[in-house]
Amino acid sequence: MKLCASLLISILTFGGCAALRSPAVPSHPVERLRYDIDRLLSDTLFILARTGIKIVSLKTGETLYERNSQMLLRPASNMKLLTTSTAIGLLGKDYQFRTAILTDTVLSPDTLHGNLYLKGYGNPDLKSADLDSLIAQIKWAGIKAVTGNIVSDVQYFDDLYWGAGWMWDDEPYEFEAFITPLSINDNCVRIKVTPGVNPGDTVSVSVEPVTSYVKLMNTATTVTDTALVPLNVTRLFKERLNTIIVDGQMLASSRPREYVLSVWQPELYASHLLKETLEDNGIAVNGSAQIGIAPMEAREIATHTWGFDSVVVNLNKVSDNLSAENTLKTLGAFQRGLPGTAENGIYETKLFLSQFGIDTTKFLMVDGSGVSHYNLLTAEMLVQLLTGMAQRPDLFPLFYESLPIAGVDGTLSSRMKGTLAEGNLKAKTGSISGVSSLSGYVTTRDGEMLAFSILMQNFLEGTRAYRMVQDSIGARLAEFSRTLAPRAPAQ
């Protein structure tokens, strides 16, 4: 019995140690790459979270790594890859977004006895400064006074100002600004808050652009010791008002803080800004800013254009949600007629993606930006898209140029610095609550371009730890070689 017991203990002891021993590090370059990525994903971060990954060589078509690549996951802003690739393919890099001013009355002699109509055709990047070029054309037409109103025409899109499944309590924030074909200043205002000089002083608040379209209620005070009530800057969004609320406390030693908030009815905001700018330029306007429809017989007297190539670079580099949604609805209007809708834009997107062999019945797309939690994609499908675009020399240059560059610009400007991925890896980031994603391209040490997609979700912590793992994978891909050993172990 003692001998049997000793043998059993020996078997369990040595067998257990063998089971706990780490497997030998593979010598084959691809197996070593898979080993290193598996190590990164063995972190306790991923016990509860879900991860889908696929990495493919664009040179050989070989799948270098995959994990849960066919699992449907929320893509967040990786959804923008679908929107932008389709828009590049269907609108074309030379497409021009237009904003026009029209009138249906006759000038007599320098007074316009009627309305001016400001009509939007989907440009998401129109700024207050762009109104100056429109007004210069109005002056050239000889108009010195307008007896009627300044009317915003938004018939180019439907009247759904949000995407399906967007969160109601995100309304006052810039990343969920209202969708309209007549957008200006990202449909937002910028708030700057500066502490007062002495304790008890009200803080100083400025609004950019300066406009009477928004009201300000400022009760925030300056303190010198401890701010017991945090500074709060918001809009009365539940009341559907353009009233900015600034309350709480701010330390006298604090630097100025800036906030960006959306505005309610941004199309009215646009006509309001145009009216104020006309008056600042000496053109009297008797009427008010309104929303309406330009008559069929109205003639165009001023136009502003903005290139789609600029829009798509801004869209992907900074992950601008408004640009994505306006582009999606513009696709619908351009391909299937007015009004432009998200549904028609999605229809065209799926039609476009099908040319890459993507089964469009196997994913769910409800918006153009990825804000909605309803969206569901797979890493495999995203790699199919990335691969298909890379094989289209007519489309790929602008698509590739639009992506953030690791350690250089956009949403990747501070990531992967000091690694071989810096200045090399180009990819679209994505973040919503409990979701972090990264999909794009990276070139290895051998000059081999890879397409990859990393989708992570269902975590409670912030995204930082998950982004660090993504960055480690990106750096490891950049140092991958089929002939040389890895420069250093993946961390």
Image: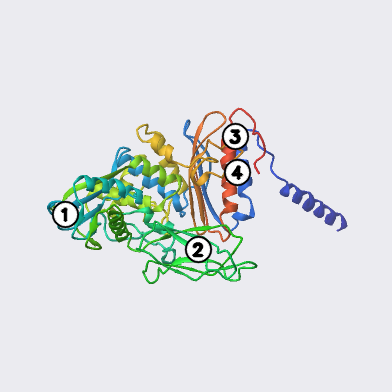
Q: Which residue is mark 3?
A: 479
| Relative image position of residue 77 (x, y in whole percent) | 44, 51
| Numbered circle sitting on residue 472 | 4
Q: Quadrant of residue 403?
A: top left
Q: Which residue is mark 1?
A: 111
Colour pattern: rainbow
Work out whether mark 3 precedes mark 1 in sequence or the reverse, and give the earlier one. 1
Separation of marks 3 and 2 at Cα, in angstroms: 51 Å
Tell me the amino acid under the disc marked 4: Ser
Tell me the amino acid under the disc marked 2: Ser
Q: Nearer the viewer, residue 200 or 153?
A: 200
Does 387 sit above or below residue 318?
above
Q: Are circles 3 and 1 on residues that touch, CB within 8 Å?
A: no
Separation of marks 1 and 2 at Cα, in angstroms: 41 Å
Q: Residues within 10 Å of mark 1 (few under 14, many from 20)?
A: some
Is label 4 or label 2 in front? 2
Q: Which residue is mark 2?
A: 204
Work out whether mark 3 precedes mark 4 in sequence or the reverse, and give the earlier one. 4
Q: Is residue 12 left or right of residue 207?
A: right
